[in-house]
Structures are given as structure tokens and as C-alpha cells.
Image (cartoon, rainbow, N blue to C red):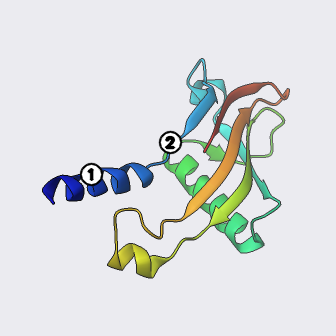
């Protein structure tokens, strides 16, 4: 019985994990390239309220990291985020069952580009 419970615990903990895939790592610290960042969040399957909240959260995190957001300058970094899938999950199941049950998911691709359109970093989940 103990082996079965341990096996279930390992399976549930592994299914609750998701990994971020960095397809193009940044060669330099992006803050050294430019401190001005414009944020564009799009998505065909996501609702407008979700995209607005995600945009505000990204801008807040960038400000905390020391970037300036959308200053009126031609030379700036552009963060393009495309949300392809969003599932909020089930909060009640997460609370009652745990072990990753009822978890939500956000599938996206994000890329940093310079003002010339060159991709500096690309990641997705």
C-alpha cells in the first residue's frame, strides 16, 4: 500500500509540472541593449480581459526589473507575446484535491526584438 501511495504522489507531482522552453537565449543582458520596452500581447483564443491583465502584469514586472515602458523613442525593445491557449482550471479542485488536479494553463510564445526587428530572445510555454 505504501508503494502505491508513493507512486501516486510521484505521478501527481510530475503531472503538475510545466517547463518553459527557451528557443533563442539572449546573448547579452537585454537591459544593456536598451532600457525602453514596448509590450504587445495578442491572442486568438484568449479573451480581451485576460490579454489586458497579462499586459499590465508584464509591464509591472518590467518596471520592477528597471525597464522604462513605452517611452516615445524610435530605439526600443519590443516584447511580443502571443497567447495561443488559456485554461483557468478549477480552483475548487485545486483546493480540495491538490497534487496538480484542477490546474490551469497558459500556452504562449514571447520574443524580444530590437527596433530593427531582429529577434534577441525567444521563449514559450
Name the one closer to the observer, 41 or 31.
41
Furthest residue in direction left, as rendered: 2
Q: Does dot 1 land on a helix, a strand or a loop?
A: helix
Describe the element under mark 2 as helix, strand or loop.
loop
1 or 2: mark nearer the eye: 1
Question: Quadrant of residue 68 in the image?
Answer: top right
Q: Is residue 25 left or right of residue 15?
A: right
Q: Residue at x 54, y 71 (%)?
A: 89
**Up/down of 29 relative to 80, above or below:** above
**Is 57 above or below relative to 19?**
below
Q: Are marks 1 and 2 in contact (CB under 8 Å)?
A: no
Residue 74 occupies quadrant: top right
* Residue 19 placement (x, y as % from top left): 50, 42
Numbered-mark total: 2
* Crowding near the residue tagged with mark 2, few <14, some 14–19, many ≥20 C-alpha atoms within 10 Å: few
**Residue at image location 34% in from the left, 74% down from the top:** 97
Q: Quadrant of the N terminus?
A: bottom left
> Residue 41 in the image: x percent, y percent?
75, 54
Location of residue 67 by image quarter: top right
Q: Is residue 105 above or below residue 18?
A: below
Q: Position of residue 80 (x, y in %)?
A: 75, 44
What is the CA distance from the residue labelled 1 to the residue labelled 2? 22 Å
Is 118 in front, or is 122?
122
Task: Say which residue appears at 55% left-offset and 24% top-offset.
Answer: 29
Identify the residue position indicated by label 1 in the image. 7
Residue at the image point whose x is 57% and y is 47% from the top: 62
Q: Looking at the picture, how far across and down is residue 26, in whole percent?
A: 61, 24
Residue for badge 2? 19
Which disc is residue 117 wearing? none
Give the position of the C terminus as an image quadrant. top right
Amino acid at each position: 500500500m505504501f508503494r502505491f501511495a508513493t507512486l501516486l504522489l510521484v505521478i501527481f507531482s510530475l503531472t503538475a509540472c510545466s517547463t518553459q522552453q527557451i528557443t533563442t537565449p539572449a546573448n547579452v543582458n537585454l537591459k544593456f541593449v536598451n532600457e525602453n520596452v514596448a509590450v504587445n500581447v495578442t491572442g486568438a483564443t484568449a479573451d480581451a480581459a485576460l490579454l489586458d491583465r497579462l499586459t499590465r502584469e508584464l509591464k509591472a514586472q518590467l518596471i520592477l526589473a528597471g525597464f522604462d515602458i513605452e517611452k516615445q523613442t524610435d530605439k526600443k525593445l519590443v516584447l511580443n507575446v502571443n497567447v495561443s491557449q488559456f485554461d483557468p482550471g478549477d480552483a475548487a479542485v485545486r483546493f480540495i484535491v491538490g497534487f496538480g488536479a484542477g490546474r490551469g494553463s497558459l500556452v504562449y510564445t514571447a520574443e524580444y526584438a530590437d527596433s530593427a526587428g531582429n529577434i534577441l530572445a525567444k521563449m514559450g510555454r
